[in-house]
């Protein structure tokens, strides 16, 4: 795989586009190599899934509440049937606080995200100068990527 030897082309395009849609081979391995190359280039990295993401800005940057899943027969006398709201820390808070290094958020299963959620992710990259986002949009025979704006315009 000569494309993955250095990762320079990927890093250059990520730094200019800030938000990239990527298609990876289904056998895996390509994303791990690229993440390792980005860490070596000085990026702080976070790997997460798009499932259960909700509102990207709230989930990534603000303290927010999450209810536990409903598990069937529960008493409704206290806190209703839906359970107590648990406060969850923002996912990127610890990476951005007191840190000048760029942050890379790699989102798996991005094909389930709606168009408005993908636009919101692009907007987050524009507002937060240190943030870069890579969204896996599905499988392919070989590794390929494009700026998210190009994917959204098509």
Image: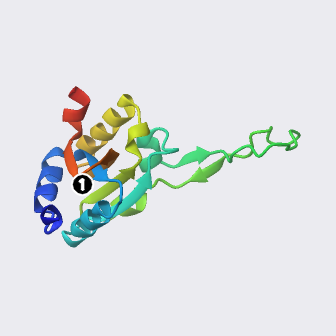
Q: Position of residue 14 (x, y in %)?
A: 18, 51
Residue that appears at 61% across and 46% down? 66
Query: Could one spot residue 133 in this view of the protein?
Result: no
Q: How many marks?
A: 1
Q: Would residue 11 appear left or right of 138 to someone viewing this image?
A: left
Q: Secondary structure at mark 1?
A: loop
Q: Position of residue 26 (x, y in %)?
A: 35, 54
Q: Would residue 11 appear left or right of 130 to someone viewing this image?
A: left
Above or below, 101 relative to 61: below
Q: Position of residue 141 (x, y in %)?
A: 26, 50
Above or below, 148 relative to 144: above
Q: Farthest top residue?
A: 154
Q: Would residue 146 appear left or right of 103 to someone viewing this image?
A: left
Q: Farthest bottom residue?
A: 40
Residue that appears at 72% across and 46% down? 84
Q: Residues within 10 Å of mark 1 (few under 14, many from 20)?
A: some
Query: Could one spot residue 87 in this view of the protein?
Result: yes
61 or 13, nearer to the observer: 13
* Quadrant location of the N terminus in the rendered image: bottom left
25 or 4, nearer to the observer: 25
Residue that appears at 51% across and 49% down? 63
138 or 84, nearer to the observer: 138
Quadrant in the picture for residue 17: top left
* Quadrant location of the C terminus in the rendered image: top left
Q: Which residue is mark 1?
A: 130
Residue that appears at 74% across and 40% down? 82
């Amino acid at each position: 795989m000569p494309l993955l030897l250095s990762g320079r082309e990927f890093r250059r395009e990520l730094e200019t586009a800030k938000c990239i849609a990527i298609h990876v081979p289904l056998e895996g391995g390509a994303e791990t190599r690229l993440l390792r190359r980005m860490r070596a280039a000085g990026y702080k990295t976070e790997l997460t899934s798009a499932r259960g993401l909700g509102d990207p800005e709230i989930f990534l940057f603000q303290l927010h509440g999450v209810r536990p899943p409903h598990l069937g027969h529960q008493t409704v006398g206290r806190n209703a049937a839906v359970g107590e709201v648990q406060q969850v820390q923002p996912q990127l808070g610890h990476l951005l606080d007191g840190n000048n290094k760029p942050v890379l958020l790699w989102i798996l299963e991005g094909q389930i995200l709606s168009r408005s959620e993908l636009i919101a992710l692009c907007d987050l990259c524009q507002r937060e100068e240190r943030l870069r986002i890579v969204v896996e949009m599905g499988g392919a025979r070989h590794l390929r990527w494009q700026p998210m704006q190009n994917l959204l315009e098509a």
